[in-house]
Image (cartoon, rainbow, N blue to C red):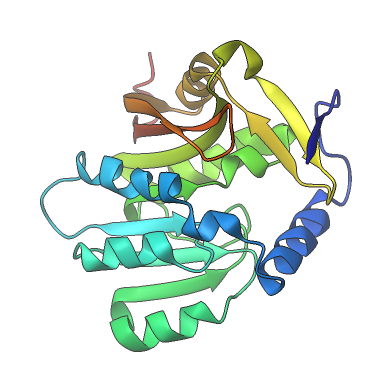
Amino acid sequence: MTTADRADTAGPGYDDVLYAAFERRYQQGEDSWSDEGAMRRLVPLLSRHLEPRAAHVLDLGAGRGPDTLALLEAGHRVTATDLLRLPDWDAIERRWGDRVTFLRGDITELDLPEGEFDAVVDNGVLHHQDPAHYTEYLAAVHRSLRPGGLLAVSLFTTVDKRSAGVLNRAEDGRLSRWFTDDEAQSLLNAAGFRTLASEQVGRKLAGLAYLLVVASAVPRGDEP
């Protein structure tokens, strides 16, 4: 359950709240997103825009690794991150060796090389961030990408677009932002991204959907 939250930010200690919430959900097998079909549409959307060669992709919020596996099977090299290390990573590392690297931590805190990645996958990270940190988060994503690199992001939205644009707080303290298409594009444009594709995918939960966006990183100084 979520409830509308009038606050613009999460308040102090939100990083700890987020970690504890996801740790509990994974430990208790309540990570329904790991098997949600709608979430598996993001990597194929990204693949339609990637150059036909092996890419180095950063998978943020990799969870149990479904997107990491899809990218590896497509021939790419993957660096995957999450707030906590999951047992599923062990089997992926054994199978794929040096084609995959797992890192525990937040992108704003990890020491990632600038311009290292051809693409970044954010399948459910941004919409759980503290809104006060959107700019910092997207700046870190932009720095990690080569000029013209791609960001594929999945955001919560609603089928009835008039109901989107709402910040919700779950009982475990996690924030969930429901974006309109205009809000998403404005946020990404301000962070130095140019939208290439956008589509809405319905969820099993009535009235809710995902907004899938692929955008390219505009070199700094070339923004309109």
Task: Locate the N terminus and report the quarter of the image it occupies.
Answer: top right
Left or right: residue 58 versus residue 129 is left
Report if residue 106 is visible in the image.
Answer: yes
Q: Is residue 171 depicted above or below 79 in this figure?
A: above
Q: Which is more toward the observer, 206 or 190?
A: 206
27 and 134: which is toward the camera: 27
Residue 61 is at least partly visible in this image: no
Q: Position of residue 123 (x, y in %)?
A: 48, 48
Q: Residue furthest right?
A: 12
For the view shown, which residue lies furthest in the bottom direction?
A: 94
Q: Residue at x 48, y 26 (%)?
A: 188
Q: Position of residue 158 (x, y in %)?
A: 57, 24
Dividing the picture into quadrants, the one containing residue 80 is: bottom left
Query: Residue at horizontal 61%, vertical 10%?
Result: 162
State which quarter of the image contains the C terminus: top left
- Nearer to the camera, 183 or 143: 183
Q: Residue furthest left?
A: 52
Looking at the image, residue 175 lies above or below residue 181: below
Give the total of numbered labels: 0
**Residue 101: % across, % down:** 41, 74
Residue at 70% in and 74% down: 27
Quadrant of res 163: top right
Q: Could you tell whether 37 is left or right of 70 in the image?
A: right
In the image, taking residue 95 as reference, residue 122 lies left or right, namely right
Looking at this view, is 143 or 70 the one in front? 70
Give me the residue at 35% from left, 74% from top: 100
